[in-house]
Image (spheres, rainbow, N blue to C red):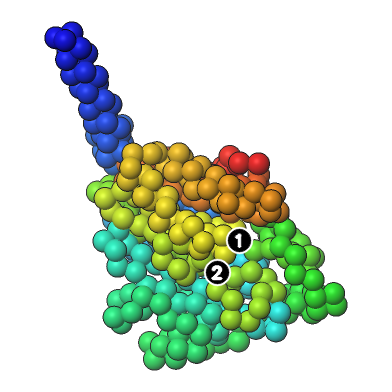
Amino acid sequence: MTNRRRFLAASLAAAATTALARTSRAAAAPGGKRRPRVVSTWDFGVAANQGAWQVLSRGGSVLDAVEAGARVPEADPNNHSVGRAGYPDRDGRLTLDASIMDGNGDCGAVAAVEHIAHPISVARRVMEKTPHVLLVGDGALQFAIEQDFPKENLLAPESEQAWREWLKKSEYKPTANSENQTYGKGKPGDANNHDTLGLLAVDAQGRLAGACTTSGMAWKLHGRVGDSPIIGAGLYVDNEVGGATSTGVGEEVIRTAGSFLVVELMRQGRSPQQACEEAVKRIVRKRMKSAKDLQVGFLALNRAGEVGAFAIQKGFTYAVCDASKQDALFDSASAL
């Protein structure tokens, strides 16, 4: 009996030591210092990261950093996934979605807003100037104008031409990663899918923030809103744990509260990589018959600056930026 008690005591002690070591790894980077870092989705995340790093490396706040980073692709005339050059809905109207969140739980978002070049900045105003989290459509536009954002005609000639090409057949058939593959070089009308800029940052004190911005699925039904402006779906951040963001078919992310799920899995002790893998695999299990035609990817960052990424299909890329390198780009592992 004594030996059994000793065995059980030793086993419990070993388990406690393992748990403590796991927690310590999540709390501090090598050398006992946290690692400031910015990560974001897709190839165009490289430029977004660099915009965020300019703020973060000068000692600016993580919230200022992620807003600055998200504004970069929003202003890019070659990016048909985000901002003023985005592809319109099937009625030819360009509507934009965005969300922003800090690690204390403060957040703001706009959805289906037209005529505003930087929805990420309007989302921040929603967070800071209203008691609300999400404003949509005409109400979001009205608020933006009241906050002195200029009203503009954002539908770029190239995007309008792509829409008119699409109208010839009016086929809506999303294809995994197609927008990213033709980024800046595709012929008008050849991209039926869409990708999102999701960006996460952590500073040397372990404070986090995130931003998400998109023009939504190309040729979508007017009024459609995906996961990007939904806190807990397209974006979730918690200073106690880390942050997560998503890309791909937003409906599938909403159904699983995907980014919240990733953060909660990290809270339970999983690494960012393990958490992203579990979140993707849950979608695959639920959508077994249609998973081969879907793309969803998750990107996660914990307080220590550790990164994880995983997607249903191959082709999801993500960018990482820190003091050692500002233009790193990686291919995510995938389930299929």
**Residue positioned most to the front:** 1
Residue at 59% x, 76% y is 224
Location of residue 302 with respect to 58 vertically, above or below: above
Residue at 59% x, 48% y is 284
Say which quarter of the image contains residue 6.
top left
**Quadrant in which the N terminus appears:** top left
Q: Which residue is mark 2?
A: 226
Q: Position of residue 245 (x, y in %)?
A: 46, 56
Q: Residues within 10 Å of mark 1 (few under 14, many from 20)?
A: many
**Quadrant in which the C terminus appears:** top right
Residue at 40% x, 38% y is 271
Q: Is residue 284 visible?
A: yes
* Marks 1 and 2 close (CB-CB < 8 Å): yes
Along the horizontal axis of the image, is 62 left or right of 272? left
Location of residue 128 with respect to 284 vertically, above or below: below
**Which amino acid is tagged 2?**
Gly
Q: Foreground: 186 or 14? A: 14
Q: Foreground: 142 or 310? A: 310
Q: CA distance from mark 1 to mark 2?
A: 8 Å
Q: Position of residue 213 (x, y in %)?
A: 51, 67
**Which amino acid is tagged 1?**
Val
Q: Which residue is mark 1?
A: 249
Q: Position of residue 75 (x, y in %)?
A: 55, 71
Residue at 38% x, 87% y is 147
Q: Is residue 318 visible?
A: no
Say which quarter of the image contains residue 107.
bottom left
